[in-house]
Image (cartoon, rainbow, N blue to C red):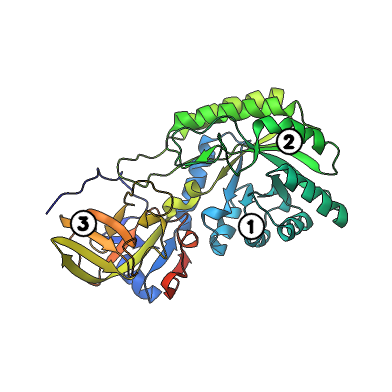
Amino acid sequence: MSKPQQPGHCELTYFPVVDKQLQVGGQPIEQFAQQMNSTPFYAYDRAIIEQRIQALRTLLPDSIRLHYAVKANPMPELVQHVARQVDGLDIASQGELVLALQTATDPRHISFTGPGKGADELQAAINAGVTLNIESATEMRRIARLAAGSGMRPQITLRVNPDFELKSSGMRMGGGATQFGIDAEQVPALLKELANLDLEFLGFHIFAGSQNLHAAAIVEAQNATLALAIRLAEYAPSPVRLLNMGGGFGIPYFPGEQPLDVKPIGENLTRLVEQAKTVLPEARLALELGRYLVGEAGIYVCRVLDKKMSREQVFLVTDGGLHQHLAASGNFGQVIRKNYPVVIGNKMGEKKTGVVNIVGRLCTPLDLLANKVELPLAEVGDLVVILQSGAYGLTASPTAFLGHPAPTEILL
């Protein structure tokens, strides 16, 4: 039987192992799954989230504002938990607006971004008093008209499509032609127009890319972000009070990837904060992070329903699938499919005996959760666990496809 074609994943140690059982919420996974009463399910560990945020705080300057991007995982209980530990929330829909307003977060520290915001969404955001990240001249004028009719004076930032990119990012969010934000070269003219509108200008939102594991690339992009903000501030109708520098912090998903070293990023941000005190003295610098805060705190658990051989390949058929975890199937932005880290949760540490394919229950060949992975001997009833599943899991998946029930989510 052929060997895996990919190098191994980095060591992932967030969920402990006792007596060959992955521990979930302090319990062996088999016992935990019995208490859940069904598979599949997602489980998120609040202690791991807290540890990540605390560790990050120790490496960043005290003055850096830390925002959570709700789209990474909008589970209501999780959003409530994270909101108590960060300085602001970033949202991208009216549904997320409702979630954010249910937390104790000051609405002024909730920012609403995304192209194509509808009039109803904008009106709800204006009424709530959240900060609007403007994505175009049309949207800026629409907000001004809506605000005039309500007697409100919205807080706004301009989302800038920078003239640089975040190198080596998993997903590019700026630097070229894009639907996101306003091209940097167009911003001066919009700022001139903004000066004649009854809108409260706060500053800029500059987001170059996401899912980056290279500290040097993030440092370079953050340096360029501050430099761009300084240039654009010369055209602003009032002093810059907020500079949202985006995020970009990634987590290791695939074979050969290693964790991001945040220390040099924190050291560079310390220097940038000091620089900003001189050139943008009223500005607070913010980071907008999603998967980096919650991604490694989550697992997706499904059970083996069948084991079959097809032309010398072994297939483990589970009760999960791409309809519940699209990203693990490789159909959420991957160009070349790679495996998420996957284990047999009730056979941890056992000798790996062969190469298998892990599939879901859907009637499509796309429903592949792991391709040719080397695992311990697995049988019907064993528990397949996909790690790194705390972000862009359930809500990024086509749950209505083929009409299977939605999985349970639980915050431990």
Q: Earlier in the sequence, mark 2 or mark 1?
A: 1
Say which element carries label 3.
Answer: strand
- Mark yes or no: residue 151 visible: no
Which residue is at a point 30% across and 56% down the rendered structure image? 342
Label at residue 154: none
Counting from the top left corner in percent of width and height, residue 22 is at 30, 60
Residue 325, position as x, y percentages in the image: 41, 61
Q: Which residue carries the number 1 mark?
A: 93
x, y percent for residue 55 = 48, 42
- Horizontal relation, residue 99 to residue 16: left or right: right
Q: Is residue 85 above or below residue 30?
A: above
Residue annotated with mark 2: 241
Who's the residue at 26% across and 64% down the image? Answer: 346
Residue 333 horizontal side relative to residue 352, left or right: right
Q: Residue at x 35, y 39 (%)?
A: 258
Furthest-bottom residue in this view: 37
Residue assigned mark 3: 375
Question: Of 162 and 248, which appears nearest the observer?
Answer: 162
